[in-house]
Image (cartoon, rainbow, N blue to C red):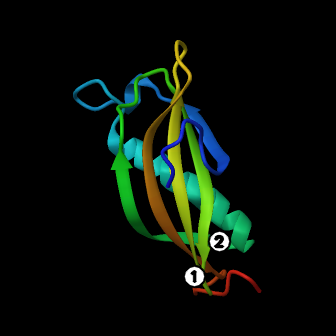
Amino acid sequence: MRNDNKPSGKLAIQIVAMPCDTNANGDIFGGWLVSHMDMAAGVEARLRAKSRAVTVAIDSLRFIKPVNVGDTVCCYADLAQVGRTSMKFNIEVWTIALDSDLTKVAEGIFSFVAIDEKGRPHPVDR
């Protein structure tokens, strides 16, 4: 993953962080952020496989800065690797506050497997 001043990959989802998403310290709860990262990777995995796809691993995850209430949370997905039935995505999370530009707040690598209607793995490229 890059550490540049602009996102890498395709904007997969964006959402505004709300007060109900905070932890005891008033920052956005890390689990909330991870779920959106997983959703972003899942959206791109479905599109790439043209089928259902399931998360099989979070290979790495790093929180860089806290997310604040009111920030627009933008999840970018970049397809890093395609195996026979699997896909790995680099996910970057950037926020936009009303008074600042894009700020990178988290990154991770998410692995997915393409599955058929019975839940069995099938080739990504078929």
Residue type, numbered disc 1: Gly
How far from the left and from the top, in percent, is residue 26? 29, 24
Q: Where does label 1 land, which residue?
A: 119
Residues at marks 2 and 1 touching, judged by CB atoms closer than 8 Å: yes
Residue drawn at (60%, 54%) of the image: 77
In the depicted view, which residue is nearer to us: 20 or 45? 45
Q: Secondary structure at mark 1?
A: loop
How far from the left and from the top, in percent, is residue 18? 46, 25
Residue type, numbered disc 2: Arg
Q: Secondary structure at mark 2?
A: strand
Label 2, label 1: how far apart the Cα atoms are: 8 Å
Residue furthest to the top: 99
Q: Where does label 2 land, which residue?
A: 52
Q: What quarter of the picture does the C terminus occupy?
A: bottom right
Rate crowding at label 2 as few (under 14), some (14 to 19) or many (20 or more) other CA atoms within 10 Å.
many
In the depicted view, which residue is nearer to us: 58 or 22? 58
Quadrant location of residue 89? bottom right
